[in-house]
Image: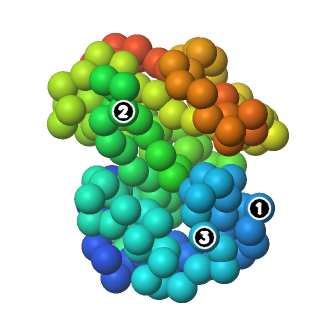
Amino acid sequence: MKSIRLEPLPTAQFSTLMPWLPDRQQCQQWGGPHFRFPFNRASFLEDCHWPELPSYVFQDSGGELLAFGQFYQHLGRCHLARLIVSPNHRGAGLGSALVTQLAQIGIRALQVTECSLFVLRTNLTARRLYEKLGFVETAYPEQCEWLRLCDFMVAPAEGFSENK
């Protein structure tokens, strides 16, 4: 594989990301229950909260977009959101690298001691990845209708230490 780097997402790259979500199920698995589908460029950018949320991508040395993720502060943690690996590159370890490197950037930027994320209960592949990276299911402090579909997971920041 060519060398890859995690870097901020330029707006122009959103058009590459959009086809990775070809149906309502995959779109809502990725973007949550309020992400509109079908989407157009404007609604996609709005529902991604562009440019308010830090958005990062893995690109290889040839400029191909390989993975995407965002983070923001939520409940005093670095909350990871909208994590996705290109359909053509799944199973190559990019998900683990994406979560780890995005967590490192977010923890440093937000100066927090934990990371969190939501995962759909039916997304067993993602859940296994998150558990392998140290995330554990934790009770969410608020009541939300959509929580019946997903779990809240938390991991300590030291699990993402660059010196590990």
SS at badge 1: helix
Spot occupied by residue 99 in the image (x, y as percentages of width and height): 46, 39
Which residue is drawn at the image coordinates 43% and 63% (left, top)?
A: 48
Residue that label 1 marks: 25
Residue that label 3 marks: 36
Residue that label 2 marks: 74
Residue 42 visible in the snapshot: yes
**Of the residues under marks 1 and 3, which one precedes in the sequence?**
1
Left or right of 107, for residue 155: right
Give the quadrant of the C terminus.
top left
Instruction: Tell me if mark 3 has few (under 14), some (14-19) or many (20+) residues whose alpha carbon lies within 10 angstroms of its own.
Output: some
**Of the residues under marks 2 and 1, which one precedes in the sequence?**
1
| Nearer to us: label 1 or label 3 | 3
Residue 5 visible in the snapshot: no
Q: Amino acid at mark 2?
A: His
From the viewer's side, name the closer residue of 105 and 30. 30
Which residue is drawn at the image coordinates 53% and 25% (left, top)?
A: 142
Residue 123: name its quadrant: top right
Q: Amino acid at mark 1?
A: Gln
Left or right of 142, for residue 92: right
SS at badge 3: loop
